[in-house]
Image (cartoon, rainbow, N blue to C red):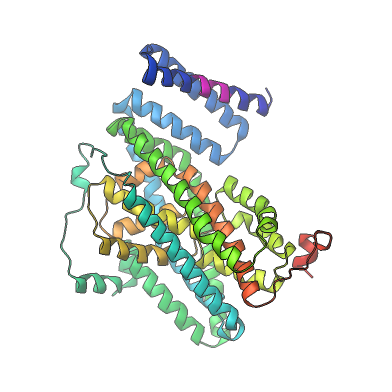
Amino acid sequence: MKPKNFSLLALITILLTATLYFIDYFITDVSNEVLFGLRWLTVIVLIVYGFSKRSLTTWILVCLVIGACVGHDWPDVAINLRVLSKIFLKLIKTIVGPLIFATLVYGIAGHSDIKQVGRMGWKSLLYFEIVTTLALFIGVAAINIFPVGEGILLPEGLQSELPPAVEQTWQDIILHIFPENIARSIAEGEVLQIVVFSVLFGIGLIMVPDRQRKVMVDFTESLSEVMFKFTNIVMYFAPIGVGAAMAYTVGHMGLGILQNLFALLLLLYGALIIFALCVLLPIALFFRVPVIRFLQAIRQPVSIAFATTSSEAALPRAMEAMVSIGVPKKIVSFVMPMGYSFNLDGTTLYLSLASVFVAQAAGMHLELGEQLIMVFTLMVTSKGVAGIPRASLVILMGTAASFGLPLWPIMAILGIDELMDMARTSINVVGNCLASAVIARWEGEFDDNLEAAEIYSADEQLHR
């Protein structure tokens, strides 16, 4: 059977199952045996569809459904699958320290050569921080106005996992930001301490002569590339980890938690749309970016980002798209790679929203001041993770550990992280494309007279 036929068969089976569940929920009772049979028929069809697609993304979604069904039908078995999700989470945790160190040091020392950057450097950094800060506050506002994490019943046996509440003074909070031993900070997953060390290390690296600096810059670049590959390897285990996490979550909490998770998913998409319309669109209009041409140009790179959940995968197409609408090659080549370290609008909005969701799900009330401190942490720690699909999961877990939040709500979020990653990654790409156009206009080098007939191909423009 052709792959297209498998897709059609999967769609028909899912629609049939969804229709019967709708009838059972809203109209009249449907036999449990019928629902059970349809559930597992759908699972079998999805497994066949997964083999036909041979895609990691597809298998993550398939295992998500399998996990929910196992958790619903055999909760005792599902609870014992937790060890698989714990293995996945442990592997993810090992990435945090090296990844943050490598990406931040390389982002600072590799791109922020003061002699070369000049005006373009400070303008880019100023723009990046203003826009990402707005994204974070939109996320915090959304989750506080619509507290979709509240009302989740804590499963029995997880109470012991909640960290004891330790009252901290403002002096304790400030002191906790600064590391006394970087190895200890990495071992204990203290993300903010790793960030402070990495920033100071990067600034110090800028100050040394070029010959000595190049060695460390090359090392951190290589280390970041290795950690990207390491994460890719770990992500091959993601379908099993996601399926086990969903099975355990549903087995412990029932299908009711899925309502909270899909409410979180809808809230994220809504917040990202608001961000695009209320922040990115006004910026484009203010800097006189041709919106229609801009949207037409970025259509393909955004589609790539949405499908692969990796901003880096869309980078080559995004660069040539911006060159094609009149942004000079030298600005595109500088701003967009720099933006991949410092301008992750979708990721930062998601992290602010998801971190408060974790606290709400755990029944831990965070005052506005505590939320703002967490927002600051997220704003810094979210830099440099655009190259890794679902890398924001790493940052979220690190921040949760730093602020004493439990990990079981993150295990629940893990089940729908694939769907959330598609949207936030797409906004990352849109934000970085817009940033290059804004800086070009700010520098007075945006070419408004470039006609469609004059648009060069990628190779002609980027290697000219």
Reply above or below: 319 against 70. Answer: below
Q: Extreme right residue here?
A: 453
| In this picture, residue 336 sits left or right of residue 193 | right
Residue 4, horizontal then vertical, whole percent: 67, 28
Between residue 382 and residue 452, name the one nearer to us: 452
Quadrant location, the C terminus: bottom right
Q: Position of residue 407 (x, y in %)?
A: 30, 48
**Which residue is depicted at the point 24% across and 69% down?**
173
The answer, for residue 398, to whether it is visible in the render is yes
Residue 6 counted in the magenta span:
no
Magenta-highlighted stretch: main secondary structure?
helix
In the rendered image, residue 398, in percent from the top left (x then y), is placed at 35, 58
Query: Image quarter for residue 408?
Result: top left
Asked if the stretch drawn in magenta spans residue 15, the answer is yes
329 sits left or right of 29 in the view? right
Vertical side of 356 occupied by 184: above or below: below
Relative horizontal placement of residue 68, taking residue 50 as reference (left or right): left
Query: Who's the residue at 50% across and 74% down the image?
Result: 126
The quadrant where residue 6 appears: top right
On the rendered image, what quadrant is the N terminus found in?
A: top right
To which quarter of the image does residue 171 belong? bottom left
Query: Observer-nearest residue: 441 or 285?
Result: 285
In the image, which residues are magenta?
10-16
Where residue 148 appears, as percent x and y from the top left, is 33, 43
